[in-house]
Amino acid sequence: MVAITTLQCTHGTLRQIKSMAVVMAGITQNNLRVPLARGTHPESKCKAIKVRIQPMNERRPFIVGLGGTTRAGSTTEQALQLALACVRRAGADTEMFSGPDLLLPMYQAEPNAGGKAGAHMIASLRRADGVIIASPVYHGGVSGLIKNALDYIEEMRADARVYLDQRAVGAIACGFGNQGPAMVLAHLRDMTHALRGWPTPLGIAINWTCNDAA
Ligand SMILES: Cc1cc2nc3c(=O)[nH]c(=O)nc-3n(C[C@H](O)[C@H](O)[C@H](O)COP(=O)(O)O)c2cc1C
C-alpha cells in the first residue's frame, strides 16, 4: 500500500519527517500537515509537497553495493559480494556495481557533463534503501575509482531524497595492514555524512595480510 501524505513545510523539515517516517516503517499517515505558513520560518521556502511513503515492511528493501577494483579476482569485490550475499539472506534485493562497472569518466561538475555515464548506477542509487561501499586502501586513502564513482552522486543533488539521504550506508575498507583500512573506513564514513547518508553502527576494516577482520 502506498500512503499519499500532504505536507506543508520547508525542505529541511520535509527531509526530517520523511526520515522519521521511513525509520518508523509500517506507519500509515494521511493528510499530515505541518503548520508552517509561507515566510514565517527562517528557511522561509514553505510550500505544499506531496510525498509518497511506501512502508518498508510491505516490500523487500533494495541494497546497492558499490566497490572493488578493476583487478580480476579483486579481494575488495569479494568482500562486497559476501556482504551482499548476507543482505540477500536477510531478505533484501541487491545490485552490485563492481570495479569494471565503475570505470567512469572523471566526474565533471558542469551540467550534463556526465552524459549517460553512470546513469544506471545513479538510477539504482535513487531507488536504494541502503548502500554498501567497498574501497581498497590506495596510499592511505579511498581509491580514485571509488571516489570518482561517489562524486557522480552529485547528480542526485536536487532529488527529494538528496544524495544518500535516508539510506543506511555500510562501509568496507580493504588493505595490506591495519592502519590503512582503519583510515579508509573513517574516510568512507565521513563521505557518507557529507552525502547525508546514515552510516551503519559497524563498519568493516579488512587487513588481507591476516585472516581476521577488525
Ligand atoms: C596503488 C596502490 C596503493 C596501495 N596503498 C596501500 C596503502 O597505503 N595501505 C595499505 O594497507 N594497502 C595499500 N595497497 C594495497 C591495497 O589496499 C590492496 O591491493 C587492496 O586492498 C586489494 O585490492 P583488490 O581488491 O584489487 O584485491 C595499495 C595498493 C595499490 C595498488
Image (cartoon, helix red, strand yellow):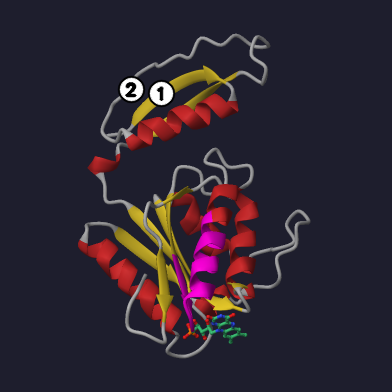
**In the image, is residue 181 above or below residue 176?**
above
Instruction: Using residue 186 as the reference point, say whether residue 29 is left or right of it.
Output: left
* Helix, strand or loop at mark 1: strand
Specify whether residue 183 is painted magenta.
Answer: yes
Q: Are marks 2 and 1 in contact (CB under 8 Å)?
A: yes
Q: Is residue 36 visible?
A: yes
Q: Give the CA separation, mark 2 to mark 1.
A: 6 Å
Q: Which residue type does callout 2 highlight?
A: Gln
Instruction: Using residue 131 as the reference point, say whether residue 25 is left or right of it.
Output: left
Can you give x and y, in whole percent of width and height, for residue 169 in the image?
A: 44, 54
Q: Is residue 117 visible?
A: no
Can you give x and y, in whole percent of width and height, for residue 193 in the image?
A: 55, 48
Q: Which residue is mark 2?
A: 29
Q: Residue at coordinates 40% horizontally, 61% vertically from top-left? A: 203
Q: Main secondary structure of the magenta part?
A: helix
* Helix, strand or loop at mark 2: loop
For label 1, count other residues whose C-alpha is less than 10 Å away and answer few (under 14), some (14-19) or many (20+): some
Q: Which residues are magenta?
A: 172-189
Can you give x and y, in whole percent of width and height, for residue 155 in the image?
A: 64, 53
Q: Quadrant of ligand 1?
A: bottom right
Residue 5, labelled with which disc? Answer: 1
For label 2, count other residues whose C-alpha is less than 10 Å away and answer few (under 14), some (14-19) or many (20+): few
Can you give x and y, in whole percent of width and height, for residue 6 in the image?
A: 45, 20
